Amino acid sequence: TGPIKEIEKDETGFYTVVLGEAGSMSSVRCVVDSLFTDRAAKLVSGTPATLRGVCVGYTADDMGLGADLLLNRCYPTQQ
């Protein structure tokens, strides 16, 4: 749960929702399950959202200032 920093849609139509504070170097990257693209399409950047998924790891930047938590098979819960 958190504010939506960014919503990415790739060329095949799959969504990744990035949650986190605007000024933060860290975020939660949620790759949306293809069964829930209709819900992801309704999300709006800057608004709060709750997504559920499977944690598959994280990536830390080389300077130690931030990290991205990675989740797959995510779906936005009903608000």
Image: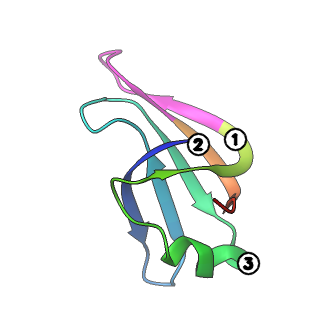
Specify the label residue 2 is tagged with.
none
State left or right for residue 2 relative to residue 57: left
Query: Which of labels 1 and 3 is toward the front?
Result: 3
Q: Residue furthest top?
A: 64
Q: What residue is rendered at 57% in x and 52% in y?
A: 30
In the picture shown, does residue 42 fall above or below 49?
A: below
Q: Amino acid at mark 3?
A: Leu
In the rendered image, residue 52, in percent from the top left (x then y), is placed at 71, 50
Q: What residue is rendered at 44% in x and 50% in y?
A: 18
- 39, 26: nearer the viewer: 39
Residue under label 3 = 35
Q: Categorize mark 3 by other alpha carbons within 10 Å: few (<14), some (14-19), many (20+).
A: few
Report, in whole angstroms, how far the alpha carbon at label 1 lies from the one at label 3: 19 Å
In the rendered image, residue 34, in percent from the top left (x then y), is placed at 68, 76
Secondary structure at numbered mark 3: helix
In the picture shown, does residue 29 fall above or below 20?
A: below
Labels 1 & 2 near each other (Cβ < 8 A): yes
In what quadrant of the picture does the C terminus appear?
bottom right
Q: Categorize mark 1 by other alpha carbons within 10 Å: few (<14), some (14-19), many (20+).
A: few
Report, in whole angstroms, how far the alpha carbon at label 1 lies from the one at label 2: 6 Å
Q: Is residue 63 magenta?
A: yes
- 36, 42: nearer the viewer: 42
Q: How is the image coloured?
A: rainbow
In the rendered image, residue 4, in percent from the top left (x then y), is placed at 41, 51
Which stretch appears magenta? 57-68
Q: Amino acid at mark 1?
A: Val
Residue under label 2 = 70
Secondary structure at numbered mark 1: strand
Residue under label 1 = 56
Q: Amino acid at mark 2?
A: Leu
